[in-house]
Amino acid sequence: MQDYKVSVITSVASVIILALLSWIGQQWLSSDLEYKTLSRDAYLSAPLGQQGLTMYHKDKKLDNVSVVDFGIFNRTSKQFNDVEVAFSIGDPKYYDSLVSVGIITPNGTQSSEFAYELPSKDKGIKKFMIKVVPKNLGKKYFHIAFVFDGDKAPPMSVVSMTKDIAIDPHSEWQDVVIIFAVMAALIVVASSIFFLIADFAEYILQPRRHKKLVSKFRAHAQSCAAQSDAALNEKSVEDAVLVYSSFLKPKHTKLWVKVFGERRSLI
């Protein structure tokens, strides 16, 4: 039983350590920003006309809009300053259909202090300067939304224009590792608590169980001695009881022995 418990705890602990090392490596060794993108065609559930609304862009009436969202994350252990990012519209036919673009900074920060749009000579590129990207944002991120006229959103991409600062696609595996590490940690904690309670129960109950077994053996040995023709005296019976008792002597968990001391035999 003891070997089995040690094996289970060691296996689970090894898995948790590997998961945590992977997560820590991503947190502290990665030097790149990350981005997520989400494209939604025909953003409105019903065309504006059907909703009794009218919207114009550059004197053109809009029936529906499509949206491309970008989220910029910093899950590293360092803060980035003065990061210039450029967003490119992949198809020239969508250049003139851009209705609006805006950036929303993480909760608790003011947009004017953290980010602003830069002028761009290329109609297909929109640039932003993010003055400060705080470290370890977690689930918080800089949100950049592009709204286009029409039912179809164009392909878009983003790059960092700042030297030595890269921006890569958001790493989904880190989220999986975190969830796995949390679940594994809960399992090992629950298992440890269960084994500790079971061991403590054994620590309390074993001496009484030991006494009961030895008493039964003594009664049986005395009965056999009384029925035997051999000259078995009381000392011989007690010697046999001591040998039997030594084989069944409780082996307490070291933790409880250190905390409460060795429990004395009740025989």
Image (tube, rainbow, N blue to C red):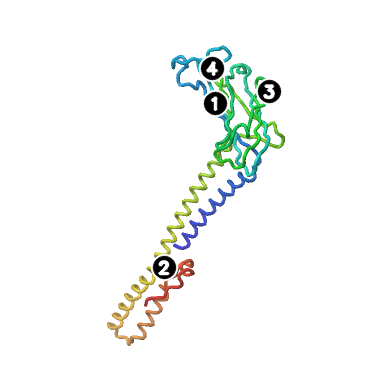
Expressed as whole percent of the image width and height from the top left, the position of residue 165 reads 68, 36
Q: Where residue 150 is drawn, which disc sits there?
A: 4
Nearer the observer: mark 3 or 1; the answer is: 3
Disc 3 to disc 1, C-alpha distance:
23 Å
Q: Work out whether mark 2 precedes mark 3 in sequence or the reverse, and give the earlier one.
A: 3
Q: Which quarter shows the N terminus?
A: bottom left
Q: Name which residue lies at 28% across and 80% down.
A: 223
Q: Work out whether mark 4 precedes mark 1 in sequence or the reverse, and give the earlier one.
A: 1
Task: Say left or right for 249 vs 222.
Answer: right
Q: Where residue 39 is drawn, which disc sits there?
A: 1
Q: Where residue 120 is drawn, which disc sits there?
A: 3
User: Mark 2 highlights which residue?
Assistant: 203
In this view, the residue farthest toward the right is 163
Q: Work out whether mark 1 precedes mark 2 in sequence or the reverse, and give the earlier one.
A: 1
Disc 2 to disc 3, C-alpha distance:
75 Å
* Type of amino acid at the residue the image marks with label 1: Ser
Q: Name which residue lies at 50% across and 51% down.
A: 185
Q: Quadrant of residue 244?
A: bottom left
Expressed as whole percent of the image width and height from the top left, the position of residue 85 reads 66, 30
Q: Quadrant of residue 106?
A: top right
Q: Work out whether mark 4 precedes mark 2 in sequence or the reverse, and give the earlier one.
A: 4
